[in-house]
């Protein structure tokens, strides 16, 4: 059964190896690892996509990792079967395949690239113009410059991030239950949206 685990660990040689060993001993098999963020205080945040053996509780993997010096599991959750880690460059390659469809493809790729539950594009006047299947039918346009997290007062379960596409359109992603969007993810989303706009104009 696939799980996505976000872990904070010391940014020193050997740390990831210790985490990998702890996961293996506890009954998990690592499928992919992606560095989410390197903080300025000597720690790193990594996403680990892992397969958990039948009968193994994910809590046991969390406990094994948390026992390591300087390691803290920030989040663990079931992950869609067949899910994989898609790097930004691979997303850009997908976008360049058909520049005319780049903006729709961007929305399709955002949930995979940033491991969110859904994504949508919202126009100032037209409302939601394109969305992935799990996205809400309706969402209010938000004035913004660049990319940022969004606070939705009436929703305390889903975490939101958004990026300006142009003066009349934004892209929004939703992640139910966590983990929090870190600064580097928000910046990457803004960069990827900017690239999609450039590609679509070719």
Image (cartoon, rainbow, N blue to C red):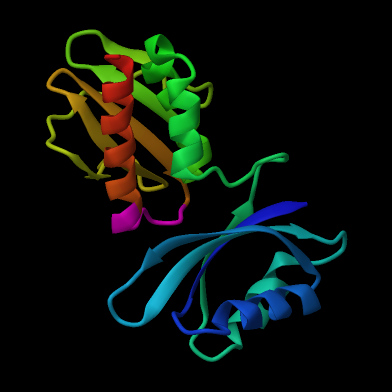
- Please report the residue visible at 30 percent of the width from the left and 48 percent of the height from the top: 186
In this image, 34 relative to 155: left or right?
Answer: right
Q: Is residue 118 visible?
A: no
* Residue furthest right in the image: 54
Q: Position of residue 56 (x, y in %)?
A: 82, 66
Query: What secondary structure do most residues of the magenta stretch adopt?
Result: loop
| Residue furthest bottom as drawn | 69
- Magenta segment boundaries in residue numbering: 178-184
Residue 180 appears in the picture as rendered: yes
Q: Residue at x 68, y 74 (%)?
A: 20
Query: Quadrant where the C terminus lies?
Result: top left
Percent coordinates x, y for residue 101 in the rendering:
42, 12
Please state the horizontal and vertical placement of residue 198, each as a whole percent of the image. 26, 23
Q: Is 56 situated left or right of 178 in this image?
A: right
Left or right, residue 114 beside residue 67: left
Report whether 74 appears left or right of 25.
Answer: left
Which residue sits at x=12%, y=30%?
143
- Tell me if residue 149 comes above or below residue 122 in the rendering: below
Residue 179 within the magenta-colored segment of the rendering:
yes
The residue shown at (32%, 16%) is: 200
Q: Position of residue 55 (x, y in %)?
A: 87, 63
**Which residue occupies the foreground of this view, 45 or 156?**
45
Q: In the rendered image of this protein, does residue 88 appear above or below residue 5?
A: above
């Amino acid at each position: 059964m696939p799980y996505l685990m976000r872990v904070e660990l010391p940014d020193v040689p050997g740390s990831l190896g210790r985490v990998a060993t702890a996961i293996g001993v506890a009954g998990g098999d690592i499928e992919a690892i992606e560095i989410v963020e390197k903080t300025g205080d000597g720690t790193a945040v990594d996403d680990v996509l892992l397969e958990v053996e039948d009968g193994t509780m994910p809590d046991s993997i969390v406990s094994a990792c948390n026992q390591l010096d300087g390691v803290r599991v920030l989040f663990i959750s079931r992950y869609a079967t067949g899910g994989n880690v898609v790097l930004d460059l691979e997303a850009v390659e997908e976008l360049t395949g058909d520049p005319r469809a780049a903006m729709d493809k961007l929305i399709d790729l955002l949930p995979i690239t940033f491991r969110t539950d859904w994504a949508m594009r919202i126009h100032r006047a037209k409302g939601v113009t394109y969305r992935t299947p799990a996205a809400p039918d309706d969402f209010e346009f938000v004035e913004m410059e660049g990319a940022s997290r969004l606070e939705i007062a009436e929703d305390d379960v889903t975490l939101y991030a958004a990026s300006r596409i142009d003066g009349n359109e934004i892209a929004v992603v939703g992640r139910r239950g966590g983990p929090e969007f870190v600064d580097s993810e928000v910046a990457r989303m803004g960069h990827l949206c900017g690239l999609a706009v450039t590609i679509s104009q070719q």
